Amino acid sequence: DAKTTQPTSMDCAEGRAANLPCNHSTISGNEYVYWYRQIHSQGPQYIIHGLKNNETNEMASLIITEDRKSSTLILPHATLRDTAVYYCIVRVGNYGQNFVFGPGTRLSVLP
Amino acid sequence: GAVVSQHPSWVICKSGTSVKIECRSLDFQATTMFWYRQFPKQSLMLMATSNEGSKATYEQGVEKDKFLINHASLTLSTLTVTSAHPEDSSFYICSALSDRGSQPQHFGDGTRLSIL
């Protein structure tokens, strides 16, 4: 079973920031938080990951709470092409383990 | 960024046919590759994990004689659906993982398999 819980769906206005929450209250100290998204009929696309500190890249920012029990993915200026299912996954740093996908959050960016 | 190529992207074939799907890591060596299956409006479900040069590990309920996996090199894994039937119709996705710390998995674009 997935170790994360996310809202089923969210809407966001085009050009505004999209904030996608994820709860991972049972996360272990050596588990990373990864975010992926899947646009219809494509494979999941890697967005960002982190362990303790907040992270930012060209796609998004990842804010992890101090107790690490939850995180938020921020898309600073959502576009229509950001409409997708977003998955939050926790996994131990590379020991060859797979990712367990939950149902994710379906983000709809509205014009 | 890392690129994983999956081929073919779409297959339609008759019942009883065997279908081979290829997954290649184009710019990195993948010590581990994963095969997932996704039904419409559902999340990805892991089918098997393959490590280069060894036998694949299948998830519970996945028939290893039905879904043959070969990971002969550090850049190529194949999934063969043997004697496919309509219930095998699905979206199959591979991913690849390099042996480097917390690096993420990178996914192929998937193969849509339709068995008539």
Image (cartoon, grey):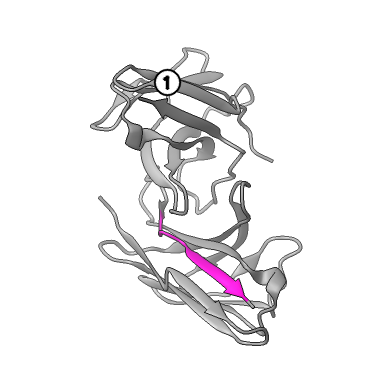
Question: To which chain does the residue with label 1 belong?
Answer: A
Work out which residue is located at the far right of the displayed protein and give it: B61
Q: Which residue is mark 1?
A: A12
* Span highlighted in magenta in the image: B107-115
Location of residue A76 by image quarter: top left
Q: Residue at x 58, y 72 (%)?
A: B114
Q: Residue at x 48, y 20 (%)?
A: A71
Q: Is residue B103 left or right of residue B17?
A: left
Q: Residue at x 51, y 66 (%)?
A: B112
Location of residue A64 by image quarter: top left
Q: Between residue A61 and residue A76, name the one nearer to us.
A: A76
Magenta stretch encompasses residue B111: yes
Mark 1 residue element: strand
Magenta stretch encompasses residue A96: no
Q: Amino acid at mark 1?
A: Cys
The x, y position of residue A67, in whole percent, is: 52, 14
Secondary structure mostly seen in the magenta stretch: strand
Q: Residue at x 56, y 35 (%)?
A: A104
Mark 1: give few (<14), some (14-19) or many (20+) Cα within 10 Å: many
The x, y position of residue B6, in whole percent, is: 40, 67
B73 lies above or below B26: below
